[in-house]
Protein backbone atom coordinates (compact mmCIF):
# COMPACT_ATOMS: atom_id res chain seq x y z
CA UNK A 1 0.00 0.00 0.00
CA UNK A 2 2.39 2.67 -1.22
CA UNK A 3 0.16 5.23 -2.94
CA UNK A 4 -2.25 7.15 -0.70
CA UNK A 5 -5.85 7.07 -1.88
CA UNK A 6 -8.14 9.83 -0.60
CA UNK A 7 -11.45 8.41 -1.85
CA UNK A 8 -12.48 6.46 1.26
CA UNK A 9 -14.52 3.85 -0.59
CA UNK A 10 -11.62 3.14 -2.96
CA UNK A 11 -9.22 3.08 -0.03
CA UNK A 12 -11.39 0.57 1.85
CA UNK A 13 -11.64 -1.54 -1.31
CA UNK A 14 -7.83 -1.64 -1.60
CA UNK A 15 -7.56 -2.33 2.14
CA UNK A 16 -9.95 -5.32 1.88
CA UNK A 17 -7.98 -6.61 -1.12
CA UNK A 18 -4.72 -6.26 0.84
CA UNK A 19 -6.27 -8.17 3.77
CA UNK A 20 -7.33 -10.96 1.40
CA UNK A 21 -3.84 -11.15 -0.11
CA UNK A 22 -2.31 -11.29 3.37
CA UNK A 23 -4.76 -13.99 4.50
CA UNK A 24 -3.95 -16.08 1.42
CA UNK A 25 -0.26 -15.99 2.41
CA UNK A 26 -0.80 -17.34 5.94
CA UNK A 27 0.36 -20.89 6.65
CA UNK A 28 -2.14 -23.75 6.37
CA UNK A 29 -1.86 -24.67 10.07
CA UNK A 30 -4.48 -24.68 12.82
CA UNK A 31 -3.27 -21.31 14.08
CA UNK A 32 -2.84 -19.89 10.57
CA UNK A 33 -6.34 -20.96 9.54
CA UNK A 34 -7.89 -19.56 12.71
CA UNK A 35 -6.20 -16.17 12.38
CA UNK A 36 -6.93 -16.14 8.63
CA UNK A 37 -10.65 -16.61 9.21
CA UNK A 38 -10.79 -13.88 11.83
CA UNK A 39 -8.75 -11.46 9.73
CA UNK A 40 -10.83 -12.16 6.66
CA UNK A 41 -14.04 -11.40 8.53
CA UNK A 42 -12.97 -8.29 10.43
CA UNK A 43 -10.63 -6.90 7.78
CA UNK A 44 -13.09 -6.98 4.92
CA UNK A 45 -16.07 -5.79 6.98
CA UNK A 46 -15.33 -2.03 6.91
CA UNK A 47 -15.90 -1.85 3.13
CA UNK A 48 -19.55 -2.99 3.10
CA UNK A 49 -20.29 -1.31 6.44
CA UNK A 50 -19.04 2.00 5.04
CA UNK A 51 -21.54 1.50 2.21
CA UNK A 52 -24.24 0.97 4.82
CA UNK A 53 -23.20 4.21 6.53
CA UNK A 54 -23.53 6.07 3.23
CA UNK A 55 -27.13 4.84 3.02
CA UNK A 56 -27.92 5.65 6.67
CA UNK A 57 -31.47 6.72 7.44
CA UNK A 58 -30.54 9.17 10.19
CA UNK A 59 -27.51 10.76 11.83
CA UNK A 60 -27.76 8.20 14.66
CA UNK A 61 -27.83 5.37 12.11
CA UNK A 62 -24.83 6.93 10.33
CA UNK A 63 -22.87 7.17 13.59
CA UNK A 64 -23.78 3.60 14.49
CA UNK A 65 -22.62 2.23 11.14
CA UNK A 66 -19.37 4.19 11.25
CA UNK A 67 -18.88 2.82 14.77
CA UNK A 68 -19.21 -0.73 13.40
CA UNK A 69 -16.46 0.07 10.88
CA UNK A 70 -14.26 1.41 13.68
CA UNK A 71 -14.89 -1.64 15.87
CA UNK A 72 -13.96 -4.01 13.03
CA UNK A 73 -10.80 -2.05 12.25
CA UNK A 74 -9.74 -2.20 15.90
CA UNK A 75 -10.34 -5.96 15.92
CA UNK A 76 -8.32 -6.32 12.72
CA UNK A 77 -5.48 -4.37 14.33
CA UNK A 78 -5.31 -6.94 17.14
CA UNK A 79 -5.31 -9.90 14.76
CA UNK A 80 -2.58 -8.28 12.65
CA UNK A 81 -0.46 -7.64 15.74
CA UNK A 82 -0.85 -11.28 16.73
CA UNK A 83 0.02 -12.52 13.24
CA UNK A 84 3.13 -10.34 13.25
CA UNK A 85 4.14 -11.41 16.77
CA UNK A 86 4.00 -15.18 16.12
CA UNK A 87 5.04 -14.55 13.19
CA UNK A 88 2.48 -16.06 10.86
CA UNK A 89 3.13 -13.42 8.20
CA UNK A 90 6.42 -13.56 6.36
CA UNK A 91 8.03 -11.21 5.79
CA UNK A 92 6.78 -9.43 8.91
CA UNK A 93 7.02 -6.11 7.03
CA UNK A 94 3.98 -7.25 5.03
CA UNK A 95 1.89 -7.25 8.23
CA UNK A 96 3.39 -3.93 9.33
CA UNK A 97 2.33 -2.12 6.17
CA UNK A 98 -1.26 -3.36 6.53
CA UNK A 99 -1.13 -2.48 10.22
CA UNK A 100 -0.05 1.09 9.36
CA UNK A 101 -3.02 1.46 7.00
CA UNK A 102 -5.29 0.02 9.71
CA UNK A 103 -4.05 2.69 12.13
CA UNK A 104 -4.73 5.45 9.59
CA UNK A 105 -8.23 4.13 8.88
CA UNK A 106 -8.95 3.95 12.62
CA UNK A 107 -7.99 7.62 12.93
CA UNK A 108 -10.18 8.55 9.94
CA UNK A 109 -13.24 6.73 11.29
CA UNK A 110 -12.73 8.03 14.85
CA UNK A 111 -12.55 11.60 13.52
CA UNK A 112 -15.63 11.08 11.33
CA UNK A 113 -17.61 9.78 14.30
CA UNK A 114 -16.51 12.75 16.44
CA UNK A 115 -17.54 15.17 13.68
CA UNK A 116 -20.94 13.50 13.22
CA UNK A 117 -21.58 13.54 16.98
CA UNK A 118 -20.59 17.22 17.22
CA UNK A 119 -22.96 18.12 14.37
CA UNK A 120 -25.70 16.12 16.07
CA UNK A 121 -25.38 18.10 19.30
CA UNK A 122 -25.56 21.51 17.58
CA UNK A 123 -28.75 23.55 17.93
CA UNK A 124 -30.95 23.23 14.87
CA UNK A 125 -29.80 19.67 14.07
CA UNK A 126 -32.68 17.60 12.75
CA UNK A 127 -31.56 14.26 14.29
Image (tube, rainbow, N blue to C red):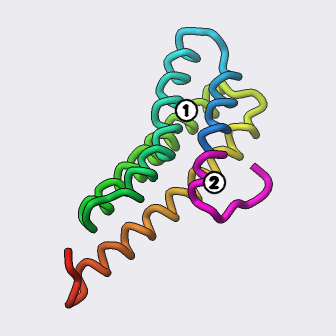
Q: For mark 1, does the 10 Å Cα neighbourhood hold few (<14), some (14 to 19), or many (20 or more) residues? A: some
Sequence-earlier tag: 2 or 1:
2
Nearer to me, 106 or 47: 47
Q: Find the distance from the CA under tag 2 to the CA under tag 1.
A: 24 Å
Which residue is pictured at 51% across the width and 46% down the height?
Answer: 47
Which residue is pictured at 60% across the width and 9% down the height?
Answer: 29
Q: Position of residue 36 (x, y in %)?
A: 55, 23
Which residue is pictured at 78% across the width and 57% down the height?
Answer: 3
Q: Which residues are magenta?
A: 1-14
Secondary structure beneath label 2: helix
Residue furthest bottom as drawn: 123
Q: For mark 2, does the 10 Å Cα neighbourhood hold few (<14), some (14 to 19), or many (20 or more) residues? A: some
Which residue corresponds to mark 1? 82
Residue 26 disc label: none
Q: Is residue 87 toward the left or the right of residue 46 in the image? A: right
Of circles 2 and 1, the one toward us is 2
Which residue corresponds to mark 2? 11
Q: Is residue 123 toward the left or the right of residue 66 in the image? A: left
Instruction: Find out whether residue 4 is within the magenta segment.
Output: yes
Q: Position of residue 64 (x, y in %)?
A: 29, 56
Q: Is residue 109 toward the left or the right of residue 26 in the image? A: left
Which residue is pictured at 50% across the width and 22% down the height?
Answer: 37
**Is 62 placed above or below 114 here?**
above
Residue 25: name its quadrant. top right
Q: Position of residue 84 (x, y in %)?
A: 64, 34
Given contact means CB atoms under 8 Å apart, are the residues at marks 2 and 1 in contact? no
Q: Position of residue 34 (x, y in %)?
A: 49, 18
Residue 65: name its quadrant. bottom left
Q: Is residue 47 toward the left or the right of residue 28 in the image? A: left
In the picture, the quarter occupied by the C terminus is bottom left
Amino acid sequence: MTEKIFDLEERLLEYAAEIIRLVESLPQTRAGNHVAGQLLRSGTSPLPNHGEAQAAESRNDFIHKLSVCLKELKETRRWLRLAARVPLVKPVDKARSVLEETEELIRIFAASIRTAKNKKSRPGSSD
